[in-house]
Image (cartoon, helix red, strand yellow):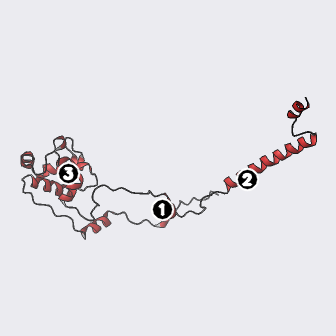
Amino acid sequence: MSDAHEEHETLIKTPQQLVAVVVLSFVVFVGLGVTVAQYVSSGYKGADNADPEAVARAIQPVAQLTLGEPEAKGPKTGEQIYKGACGACHDAGAAGAPKLGDAGAWGSRIGAGLDALVASAINGKGAMPAKGGNASLSDDEIRRTVVYMANKGGASFAEPKAASAADAPASDAAAAPAPVEAAAIAAPAYENAK
């Protein structure tokens, strides 16, 4: 029976051993907590004086996707605008759009005149949205595109001249707001009431 009694004995036999085990357990637990806290808090804290350009570079997308041909600088021809904005519908004849080069479909439209065609293109007609869905196009660009398309359909409209590159900056400068003086945007001064 002494063998059975020895199997059930514990490693802690005195009250001093119990106190020592409890204290060591506490020390180990607190030590692990402090170590984990130091590890977590020693990580990246961010930049105190972040440069906006550095932030922009850090968060820029990995890749950029641009569909279609790159935008040409300066005035565009009617053909360039047609390929970028109008060709998707007019090449296929989608939603009743007259196909490019189809004299039968363009005949009655050409008979209405260039101004009526341009007005329809600028304001939209039927399933066609205003300016062919490209609101950034100017009325002159729409006119050049309509002339291009109508001439392919049998018209003989004179192609409008594109604004020269020298004229464009002058018109942009005229449209740009005047520079604002620093004093004009400063905080308003308040008078002290005495």
Q: Secondary structure at mark 3?
A: helix
- Write the residue at 20% across / 47% down: 89
Image location (x, y in percent) of residue 19:
89, 42
Whether tag 2 and tag 1 are in contact, CB under 8 A, the answer is no
Left or right? Give the position of 14 relative to 45.
Answer: right
Q: Secondary structure at mark 2?
A: helix
Image location (x, y in percent) of residue 102:
9, 48
Q: Amino acid at mark 3?
A: Gly
Residue at numbered disc 3: 87
CA gap, disc 3 and disc 1:
37 Å
30 is higher (above) or lower (below) than 2: below
* Callout in the foreground (3, 2): 2
Image location (x, y in percent) of residue 165:
25, 69
Left or right? Give the position of 45 relative to 158.
Answer: right
* Label located before the other in sequence (3 or 2): 2
Q: Residues within 10 Å of mark 1 (few under 14, many from 20)?
A: few
Q: Amino acid at mark 1?
A: Arg
Which one is in front, 187 or 128? 128
- Write the residue at 23% across / 50% down: 131
Which one is in front, 173 or 185? 173
